[in-house]
Image (cartoon, rainbow, N blue to C red):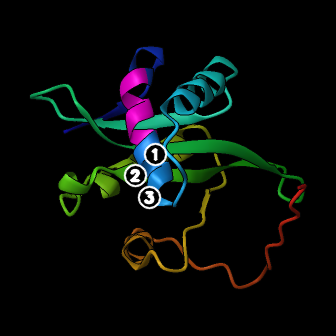
Amino acid sequence: MKIRQANYNDISKLAELFDLYRQFYNQKSDLTGAIQYLKDRMEHGQSIIFVAEELSTGNLVGFTQLYPVFSSISMQRSYLLNDLYVKKEYRKNGIAKLLIQEAKSFTKAFQGKGLELSTSMHNTNAQSLYEKEGFLKETEFLTYFWKST
């Protein structure tokens, strides 16, 4: 298994994973939209995507996507680990852990303050992994969201 940064040539294969990820969160399949979304993020340098590539086949079996965010208080950049997905048949093989470790290494290399993430209250497998990887539940701040529709 090789973990590497995705590039423009990966978009078709990556879009298939991205579409499966969205379906995991109860979104309708939209492969065309997934391709466009990923192209936009790459073309505008708005995210960093790491992929898990199976060396024997060249298939992409997982990914994580980071978005840069900034703190006025600390005057530092952090990264939002917004997406993490491993194909069902490849889970429980340490691939998600490898993707998280790559995200951590990237954050350190670019002097990021840290990584932030959120997950579904029901995704206990992910919560367990995040806690094993040193992520702490935020207890100091409340998060609010305003929906524009």
The circle on residue 24 is 3
Where residue 124 appears, x then y in whole percent? Answer: 41, 79
Q: Which residue is mark 1?
A: 64
Is label 1 in contact with label 2 (beta carbons under 8 Å)? yes
Is label 3 in contact with label 1 (beta carbons under 8 Å)? no
Where residue 96 appears, x then y in whole percent? Answer: 33, 55
Where residue 138 appears, x then y in whole percent? Answer: 66, 78
Q: Quadrant of the C terminus?
A: bottom right
Badge 1 local density, few (<14 within 10 Å), some, or many (20+)? many
Q: Which residue is mark 2?
A: 85
Magenta span: chief secondary structure: helix
Q: Earlier in the sequence, mark 3 or mark 1?
A: 3
Is label 2 in contact with label 3 (beta carbons under 8 Å)? yes
Q: Quadrant of the N terminus?
A: top left
Residue 92 horizontal side relative to residue 70, left or right: left
Q: Earlier in the sequence, mark 2 or mark 3?
A: 3
Q: Specify the quadrant of the image occupied by residue 44.
A: top right
Badge 2 local density, few (<14 within 10 Å), some, or many (20+)? many
